[in-house]
Image (tube, rainbow, N blue to C red):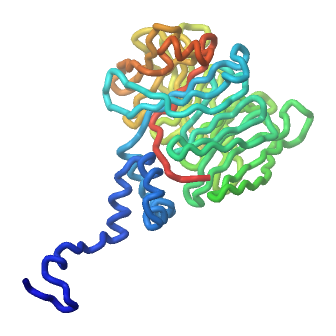
């Protein structure tokens, strides 16, 4: 036996391992899914400090964006038919498998939601958070990974969530004043959600206009379709960071009343236009080429077969346009979504399993009549808190 300085023998010295450096621990932890990290917060103060740091949150989100996208399906039993105790949002999620012909989803979260929803309601995914507006002046923001749910009372008939990537802040834009009243200007409320649970409110005013689409968040801005006082179409653009609203001129077709849908097409604002007087077997795709010059381009596509009660929640990372149903199909009927490739001009179908397709589940929660459904493609996990 060889004695070392301090009285320790050589074998004891080998058994003592050097601690893992904090930066290496952080690198290892970023590889884990968000729900696992939530459990590891209780392991030690060091790990809790690492996981809660803004640097780690940003690194984990960046890695999740490229490797851990999920497919979110949100459905809601229509408040007109369901008893109060059963009114809620059901949020299903599935891992995203490229080119798969089927996806299996599981119920991830339920949220009480005592409202009546319209058929094209949205529950978009924005920087790891889902948001949904209800018609009783409540705005819900939730994180599936941390299980955090925030309900914001709002003063107007609609609200949209956006994210400031520079200031790392979420903001909700809410139109407070009614366009139908004889006012020279409109008042909007901007609700800023702080990282410590704080909420601040400010106001933005604009010239009078009439919004008629839901807000769509793309790269630091919220867009929604509107008409000016002369009923000329335009796009209202809210800059989330600087909290100002500008307007983009639009040809009439992309915003022909309610027959168009704004989508994020490869990071650019676009509009899918469907002629309501014809079967949904063709559509026009208008793409905003230059917001400053108000320049748009247009392409027309033919589908291989007509779609019924479908809308578009946007595109996937490959640029394929997604078409999804507005309502949950009847018991025993399959739920399909469709991906249209604009370059190859072909369409593939993907069947979704596990979306309330059990008869006992539907009867238990009264998912029997007019069950609205919405899709949020490419949802990215986040461990951030509001």
Q: Identify whether 195 is placed above or below 370.
A: below
| Residue under the point 47% across and 57% down | 41
* Residue 218 visible to the viewer: no
Point 54% across, 25% down: residue? 272
Please name the residue shown 63% across and 19% down the image: 77
Residue closest to the eye, 202 or 257: 202
Position of 229 compared to 50: left or right?
right
For the point 33% across and 32% down, which residue is it?
97
Q: Whole-percent x and y of residue 310?
A: 53, 17
Query: 179 left or right of 133?
Result: right
- Position of the N terminus, as image quadrant, is bottom left
Q: Which residue lies furthest to the bottom in this view?
A: 5
- Please, is residue 341 above or below residue 208 in the view? above
**Residue 193 visible, this orientation:** yes
- Compared across the picture, whether 16 is left or right of 102 comes to left
Check the image and name the residue furthest to the right: 182
Point out residue 301 in the picture as x, y percentages from the top left corner: 44, 19
The answer to which of 322 and 270 lies nearer the viewer is 322
Quarter of the figure with residue 365? top right
Quarter of image, res 338: top left
Please, which residue is most extreme toward the left here?
1
Q: Is 342 rendered above or below residue 140? A: above
Which of the two residues, 316 or 198, is positioned nearer the viewer here? 198
Above-or-below relation of 106 to 221: above
């Amino acid at each position: 036996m060889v004695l070392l300085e301090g009285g320790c023998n050589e074998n004891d010295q080998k058994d003592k391992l050097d601690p893992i450096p904090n930066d290496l621990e952080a690198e290892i932890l970023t590889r884990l899914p968000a729900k696992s990290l939530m459990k590891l917060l209780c392991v030690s103060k060091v790990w809790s400090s690492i996981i809660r740091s803004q640097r780690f949150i940003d690194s984990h989100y960046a890695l999740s964006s490229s490797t851990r996208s999920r497919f979110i399906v949100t459905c809601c039993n229509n408040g007109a038919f369901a008893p109060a105790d059963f009114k809620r949002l059901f949020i299903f999620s599935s891992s995203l498998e490229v080119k798969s012909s089927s996806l299996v989803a599981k119920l991830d979260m339920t949220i009480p939601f005592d409202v009546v929803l319209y058929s094209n309601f949205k529950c978009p995914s924005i920087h790891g958070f889902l948001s949904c507006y209800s018609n009783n002046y409540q705005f819900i923001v939730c994180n599936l990974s941390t299980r955090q749910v925030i309900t914001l009372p709002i003063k107007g008939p609609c609200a949209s969530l956006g994210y400031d990537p520079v200031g790392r802040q979420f903001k909700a834009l809410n139109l407070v004043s009614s366009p139908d009243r004889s006012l020279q200007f409109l008042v909007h409320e901007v609700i800023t959600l702080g990282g410590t649970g704080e909420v601040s409110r400010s106001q933005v005013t604009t010239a009078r206009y009439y919004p008629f689409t839901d807000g769509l968040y793309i790269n630091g801005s919220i867009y929604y379709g509107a008409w000016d006082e002369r009923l000329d179409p335009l796009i209202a653009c809210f800059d989330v960071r600087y909290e100002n609203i500008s307007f983009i001129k639009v040809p009439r077709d992309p915003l022909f009343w309610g027959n168009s849908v704004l989508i994020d097409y490869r990071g650019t604002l676009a509009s899918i236009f469907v002629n309501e007087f014809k079967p949904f077997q063709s559509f026009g795709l208008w793409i905003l080429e230059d917001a400053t010059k108000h320049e748009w381009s247009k392409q027309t596509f033919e589908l291989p077969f007509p779609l019924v009660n479908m809308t578009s929640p946007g595109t996937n990372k490959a640029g394929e346009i997604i078409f999804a149903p507005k309502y949950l199909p009847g018991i025993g009927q399959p739920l399909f979504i469709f991906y249209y490739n604009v370059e190859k001009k072909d369409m593939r179908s993907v069947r979704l399993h596990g979306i309330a397709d059990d008869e006992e589940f539907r009867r238990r929660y009264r998912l029997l009549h007019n069950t609205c459904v919405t899709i949020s493609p490419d949802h990215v996990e986040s461990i951030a808190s509001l």
